[in-house]
Amino acid sequence: MSPVAEMEREAAGVTPHEGKLGVMIPGMGAVGSTLIAGVEAVRRGWAKPVGSMSQMGTMEVDGREELIRDAVPLAPLEDVVFTGWDIFGGSMYDAAETAGVLDRDHLRAMKPFLESIEPMPAVFEERYVKRLTAKNKKKGRNKCDLANQVRNDIAEFKSKTDRQIMIWCGSTEIFHEPKAVHQTLAAFEKGLVDDDPDIAPSMLYAWAALKEGIPFANGAPNLTVDIPALQELSKQVGAPICGKDFKTGQTFIKTILAPGFKVRQLGVSGWYSTNILGNRDGEVLDDPDNFKTKEESKLGVLEHIFHPEQNPDLYGDIFHKVRINYYPPRGDAKEGWDNIDIFGWLGYPMQIKVDFLCRDSILAAPLALDLCLFMDLAKRTPSLRHTGIQEWLSFYFKAPDAPAGKHAEHDLFKQAVHLKETLQRIRVESAVGETVAAR
Amino acid sequence: MSPVAEMEREAAGVTPHEGKLGVMIPGMGAVGSTLIAGVEAVRRGWAKPVGSMSQMGTMEVDGREELIRDAVPLAPLEDVVFTGWDIFGGSMYDAAETAGVLDRDHLRAMKPFLESIEPMPAVFEERYVKRLTAKNKKKGRNKCDLANQVRNDIAEFKSKTDRQIMIWCGSTEIFHEPKAVHQTLAAFEKGLVDDDPDIAPSMLYAWAALKEGIPFANGAPNLTVDIPALQELSKQVGAPICGKDFKTGQTFIKTILAPGFKVRQLGVSGWYSTNILGNRDGEVLDDPDNFKTKEESKLGVLEHIFHPEQNPDLYGDIFHKVRINYYPPRGDAKEGWDNIDIFGWLGYPMQIKVDFLCRDSILAAPLALDLCLFMDLAKRTPSLRHTGIQEWLSFYFKAPDAPAGKHAEHDLFKQAVHLKETLQRIRVESAVGETVAAR
Amino acid sequence: MSPVAEMEREAAGVTPHEGKLGVMIPGMGAVGSTLIAGVEAVRRGWAKPVGSMSQMGTMEVDGREELIRDAVPLAPLEDVVFTGWDIFGGSMYDAAETAGVLDRDHLRAMKPFLESIEPMPAVFEERYVKRLTAKNKKKGRNKCDLANQVRNDIAEFKSKTDRQIMIWCGSTEIFHEPKAVHQTLAAFEKGLVDDDPDIAPSMLYAWAALKEGIPFANGAPNLTVDIPALQELSKQVGAPICGKDFKTGQTFIKTILAPGFKVRQLGVSGWYSTNILGNRDGEVLDDPDNFKTKEESKLGVLEHIFHPEQNPDLYGDIFHKVRINYYPPRGDAKEGWDNIDIFGWLGYPMQIKVDFLCRDSILAAPLALDLCLFMDLAKRTPSLRHTGIQEWLSFYFKAPDAPAGKHAEHDLFKQAVHLKETLQRIRVESAVGETVAAR
Amino acid sequence: MSPVAEMEREAAGVTPHEGKLGVMIPGMGAVGSTLIAGVEAVRRGWAKPVGSMSQMGTMEVDGREELIRDAVPLAPLEDVVFTGWDIFGGSMYDAAETAGVLDRDHLRAMKPFLESIEPMPAVFEERYVKRLTAKNKKKGRNKCDLANQVRNDIAEFKSKTDRQIMIWCGSTEIFHEPKAVHQTLAAFEKGLVDDDPDIAPSMLYAWAALKEGIPFANGAPNLTVDIPALQELSKQVGAPICGKDFKTGQTFIKTILAPGFKVRQLGVSGWYSTNILGNRDGEVLDDPDNFKTKEESKLGVLEHIFHPEQNPDLYGDIFHKVRINYYPPRGDAKEGWDNIDIFGWLGYPMQIKVDFLCRDSILAAPLALDLCLFMDLAKRTPSLRHTGIQEWLSFYFKAPDAPAGKHAEHDLFKQAVHLKETLQRIRVESAVGETVAAR
């Protein structure tokens, strides 16, 4: 775009919402089906979108608290449409039944709606998710071919919707470090053709989305868009990206408690966290390679909140351990048990135990919804569209992505402040747009 | 003071620290002795003042984090001197031994120092603290006489120190509502002479301190300075006040967790808190009238954080219950167990259990220290001296005092922001003073 | 009965089961409806009677483990018929819905069956259960009249069934001590006519049952049959009695753990137990007078297991506290949290915390079923029929009744041994009967 | 011994205690030093031997409860003398200080006594305990030579004491299965000469002890005496053996709770156990090979109590997982957290969480003491001396050894009954001895 055109667009402010927002979900399992069924239940007036800041949260407007969804031009739930891909086939009704998250009465009542959404065959590579076997998977000559099949799926969906967003709700892939193939877009696209083993399935989806100018949000701890190649593409095409790993369960609690200890200058000598979970997520994470990806995501949290290098007396010697155990009796419900060893005045020790009986998908679904709506908004906001990683959405992630050389904020409360401030800026920018539009 | 004089004083900035800061403690039990022994241990280099923001905390100065105690002109620990009153007699060594908080080796090593501090006979009225019996108590014709005896004690301590501060570390008194006698200073002072039953012992101390121009901090949930009469006196004489109820243990955790749920738009349907504690505090609170005072202090917290009136879908129907049980096997250690019933997406329920094995005095002592130093600083800061209640110290209290008609902030993180901002203002004001002084 | 007749009966052994066993339940709320719906679900083959020793348990027969229900002549579930009384009216379907214990799908599937069972109007006296208001209650001139109305109800039920048993599943009544009116049957029956305030509603039911020759089991901690008058009547008419207070939840766990500490010679210095529950039971127990009845029942347990008088070094100084809190968010589910302070080698302290997320009615229903079947068996067993209190059923009770001057066993494992031994004796006696019958 | 001599000895009953009982401990770390310091503290009258059945427990004698130590001819604590081997050197005072179990005041007061006990250099093989490095270790040509050095140590200790017992309190060795070398004594002794890699250090000690006619008790989960070769030797020489793995902490609680669920016919669908511990034990178990040995020992418990094959409806589908994590902040204290998923009436689920803040050595020391005294007694009891494995001591072990083809009892309560019954038999046999002696 020419600088002049760009300036004109900026002057035009935030593009208002109109038409249908299409949400595309790679991995339509427990989280995906809970999101879709939940949005429908809210639309029918049966339930509240609890946990969703975009729907329930407020922000200050002219000295009063106003609902965020009234203060900034978000797509309303009525205009959201879903599609996606999954390796297990079956409709969203089947997925929701398997997940066992939602009440059977609720599900039955919206069975026709849920049955109408059937995932497309997915891209799958067994070495990235060892414990699962795909039943519904794309075949292709090489990764480039597979990625283009995804682009075709997207193109078809574009014909039915006005704007699109892609959000990864699939499995945790095995841990792998960025390689040369991830460093530039050119190397990456060559790698697609060469079937490079370091290009993970999630990267194919992200690349396809970005190529189509569609924002991509990463709900798993996978590397995906946390590589220079795709960050470059994101900025180039003006399709925002964000990630990674929905901040649910134990890490959510951790990012609440840790800032509390810090603000009170209480030291921490140990933090032991164990999780038991019985759903597909648990099964996948039972493999050490996949667990490593999750572990890295979970372990970083404390360090980024406590800054031990600045507070060595209090946090210089924390023993931090995170364990995840596949435990089928728990089903989709998850349990996180934390033992925290803190110390106070003169170094005297105290202990805190936290047992969180939570439900993974119930915690993740509203985050996914917010990310869809906010990413769509970012794409419509001139000052954000070309910035690549949306750090202002760190609030939603266990391991927030940041541009190379920067550390993202991990303190939930500071993240919330940053999110609200950005929404304020969007609101102002949006008002400009309205003025321009009104001319 | 004439407007001109006032302006000159303001121009003079924050009075620098010089000489000795005398700390006067009504109620020299577990918290008092842990504070005193701890300050001495820190002075000797044996331990760190963990939990004390004034000693360990930092604030931003010219873009870098600097220790608060270097950034604002606090009294250094070397210049702090202690005295106080107690109904049980015995030296601080005895009190520390009875409390059983600190390691016997630590105590023995500073025995001579601790034995040198002996509490003066205290004002005591049995109906306000039913479970205790005084051994070391003042006798007087009426409350006015008793209060003047306290003033005499203060006067004597003034001869040995340069500035003073009083901090209540005594027992929880029975619950009582403000009456006419508490409404004006005149009524209050008449009540002293008339031996009005609604004037509690803690009020005698506060009145005596303020009459002597000395700041008063209230570590218990007692009514004390939370009445118009003493707020009037505080402003008049330029001796700041603050309160009430040190934010330790369970309520501390509550003010961390609740903002976390709120920021994530998670609903709360129930919060059950039980405490077991075995020290004198537990004994006193085993009486229903004394417990009521504590209960009021503890119950208000959630309401002030969640604002159910603004968020009825999420917090409009919380069942909140707080229990305290005297349980001698626990000694000074305290245990708080919380069960929290939250709900997420579509209203689905989840549970959190928190077991906090804490130590009351270890958590309270650094708060008491900070309050002494910050209240002394407030008294030396022209813009704060005459403002009565120091809301910026809400961070330290379960039930922060606020001027009539105002609600104090209860969210720990917002309180911390307010505290740091005030310290920044003091720093600026202090620099002005230095400039003026340098002229 | 003449000694000769008695001897002949003894010789006849255990009367075999035949026809219908009618179960009469005063108080058809959560426990009652869960029992009834559960028995029906088992009969239909939908579920297993887990928790019921009579149905799932085994005993040794000729060197092999055999199901108890095959080894002794119990009434089979197919032949059990239910009726009862309740102050709230509505059918068992309504009661089950209100209780919210069973899955809605289960309930719907047996709606016609559950609707066919409607409680008769109940005897109710407000001072005994303060927090409830009766909607469906008997009116009468005096307690004698009311008790006779219950006898009439029984008489009518007798016409439809072959044998009967009564089991109290109603509320906890207020605490009251045995008085003169409870000492002899004559005094008691005079008290009925005189409307003596110390005769509780539960006693009217028990008296009516026993007068009709029907065994009575007491599932609540009420005084009921724990008085000489009704024990006399029980022996006289040959209708066994037992009680009191179903051993569910926290006390059940306590009677498991305490014997474990004792057998390992570990000392106990404190045991703090708190309960939160949200059903009608919780509501009733929120009244201090009703709680006192429960508290007495719960507190005795440790003393009877530890025998502090024999083990003063280990158990001579236990601080035992039990709290119950009404907490509506929990619904019928119940949560018991225990903190146990134990000590080992040289007196060093350790702690155990137990959090039991249980369901009152799910735990109580199988106990109620066993008691119905075993009490019916006791009535048919010559050597047990005239012994009054059935101590061998102590296994089922928090506060097992014992004849005057005797202490019942509280150790769950010893109780189980006693129960099995008695079943063995009944089996032998039963075989004698079969031999006699075969002649 | 000739058959005649044997018969005469049998006739003589239990040999009475006389002289000194020498206790030899391979592995003198936290457990060993806590045992030794504790026995001395008890001898000095400073503390009670809590947790020791031999010292605090009672048994029925002529209808009254009498202390076990008065009822059977145990060696009194006054006559117990300690020695042992350790790879770390340093005296028992150093070991106790490192372990950090006992109070410093206690330790100082008996410093000279503790310093007087210095471990001899130990047999060590790195591949069996990977995480430790020996400082004080025997050197030898081969395993036979090393074992004979241990025999020499024993021989020397024999000259100072009258009877001896050996008890392994050392580390957990790596998991290994019985091989051919373990099947017969001949093969084993050949293996010693051949330096067979499957002969673990603990086996050298056991062999040396047995060759010297000394009973051997195994406090770790190691294979050690659980092999035919050493069982053969044990019977041959009349030196009893027993094992394995002291039943402390989490498994102790498990063997209390599991029988409780079983006796109430409550089903179990899952049992998740995690441990955090910070002592040397934790360090060793951080290695997967060593953990496997422990895991096997811990996992078997539930199966042996629940007998899922006999109770498939209740226990046929338990998901049982045990985790141990090295967590240095915990020190010698250990924490075991269990989540137990049970189900009741109609299969409805309930949950129990148990958090055990325990201290490994405090729990283990009294078990070690009892085993020393009871094993010495067994050796003096004709009917037990030649029976090899002492199954009646199963009470003390996580994974009780049993003769080939037999399953040992795991239910703590049944184990206790068996122990007491055996003591009764010994008492009778002992009385015979006294009668014979009195002739």
Image: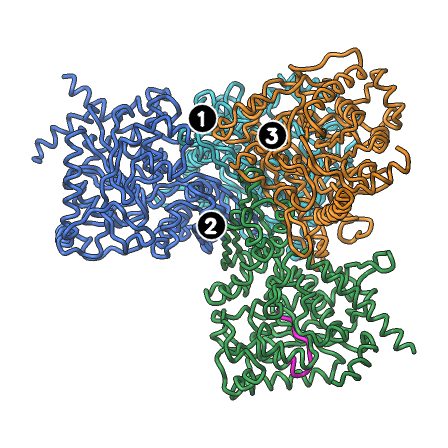
Chain colours: A orange, B green, C blue, D cyan
User: Badge 2 is on which residue?
Assistant: C274
The residue under the point 32% across, 27% down is C40
The residue identified by callout 1 is D314
| Front position in the image: A388 or B356 | A388
Magenta residues span: B209-218
Task: Specify the subunit that label 1 lies on.
Answer: D
Residue C408, position in %: x, y? 32, 44
Compare residues D214 and C221 and report the one nearer the observer.
C221
Residue B101 sits above or below residue D149 on the image: below
Q: Which residue matches tag 3?
A: A36
The residue at the point 39 percent across, 25 percent down is: C48
| Quadrant assignment for the C terminus of chain A | top right
Q: Which amino acid does label 2 sit on?
A: Thr
> Three-letter amino acid code at disc 3?
Ile
Q: What is the quadrant of residue A344 in the picture?
A: bottom right
Which label lies toward us, 2 or 3?
Answer: 3
Q: Which residue is drawn at 61% across and 67% down?
A: B401
Q: Do the residues labelled 2 and 3 touch (CB within 8 Å)?
A: no
- Residue A106, can we see it? yes
Q: Position of residue D61 (x, y in %)?
A: 38, 42
Asked whether residue D243 is in view, the answer is no
Q: How far apart are marks 2 and 1 (CA)?
A: 29 Å
Of the residues tagged 3 and 1, which is closer to the observer? 3
Question: Does the segment drawn in magenta span residue B216?
Answer: yes
**Could you say which quadrant of the image residue C241 lies in?**
top left
Q: Residue at x 15, y 25 (%)?
A: C12
Helix or strand or loop: what does disc 3 sit on? helix
Q: Which chain does the numbered disc 3 sit on? A: A
Query: Which quadrant holds the N terminus of chain A?
Result: top right
